[in-house]
Image (cartoon, rainbow, N blue to C red):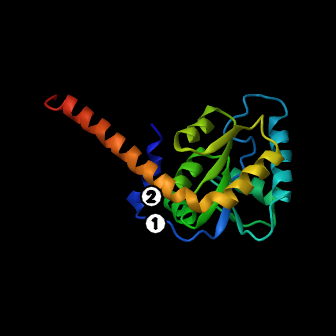
Amino acid sequence: MPCTSLFARYECGIQPKPGRFVALNYMPRGGHYDYDRAGYSERWEAVFLDFVRKLPLGEEYVFVCHNKAEVESVQRLFPSFRFFWSPFYKDYLDLFSSVKFGVFNRVHAAFALASLGRPSFVVGSDSRARMTDQIGLKNSWVGDIDSQRLVVEFESMQQTWPAFEAKMQEQLSQIEATYLDLLRGVMTANSGRP
């Protein structure tokens, strides 16, 4: 089953707004861990730098940072870009409500954005990035990605992001119904127990 973080926006009462900008997320190792693979952090930095250089004009971009290390990396590597950081998760959901689509290292950023009917592409350093398969989003392992693939995925989302919302809303309804059925089953099985 997909992560229940898909439903966080409902608890906060956040609705999708018209898409205004593209969200980017950069983690120095391409994820939380590098597993001592020599050169992967440097390779990912070079790949992402090249991708950012190829970003088309005409879009508004914001780097979404989830901790101070990401803020420092963005300020060092992409000083001319706007960035966002907050200690409150609701602020991220508010921000994502106006995003068209995203390119992320963080899986839960992809899930938060998907919950608002917007697609993303995830690059990760461990198997958690594959969670996006469950909701129809593409992903890649950091060791396999190059800047051209990032550009291709970006251009695809740039063309198709408006159609993603209806597809995702149908999926969310099915996922919610499945979770409720599972919870009812557990509650029924455990009824009457101390």
Q: CA distance from mark 2 to mark 1?
A: 8 Å
The residue under the point 45% across, 58% down is 9
- Per the image, label 1 sits on a secondary structure element best described as loop
Relative depth, front residue between 82 and 173: 173
Q: Which dot marks residue 9? A: 2
Where 52 falls versus 128 (above or below)?
Answer: below
Quadrant in which residue 82 is drawn? bottom right
Residue 86 visible in the shown view: no
- Is the Cβ of the residue at disc 2 closer than 8 Å to that at disc 1? yes
Image coordinates of residue 115 in percent, x first then y, are 49, 54
Counting other residues with Cα less than 10 Å from the Cα at mark 2, is it few (<14), some (14-19), or many (20 or more)?
A: many
The residue under the point 77% across, 53% down is 73
Q: Which dot marks residue 46? A: none
Quarter of the picture holding the N terminus = top left
Where 11 falls versus 59 (above or below)?
Answer: above
Q: Which dot marks residue 15? A: 1
Name the residue type under label 1: Gln
Name the residue type under label 2: Arg
Image coordinates of residue 50 in percent, x first then y, are 86, 52
- Left or right: 137 in relation to 82: left
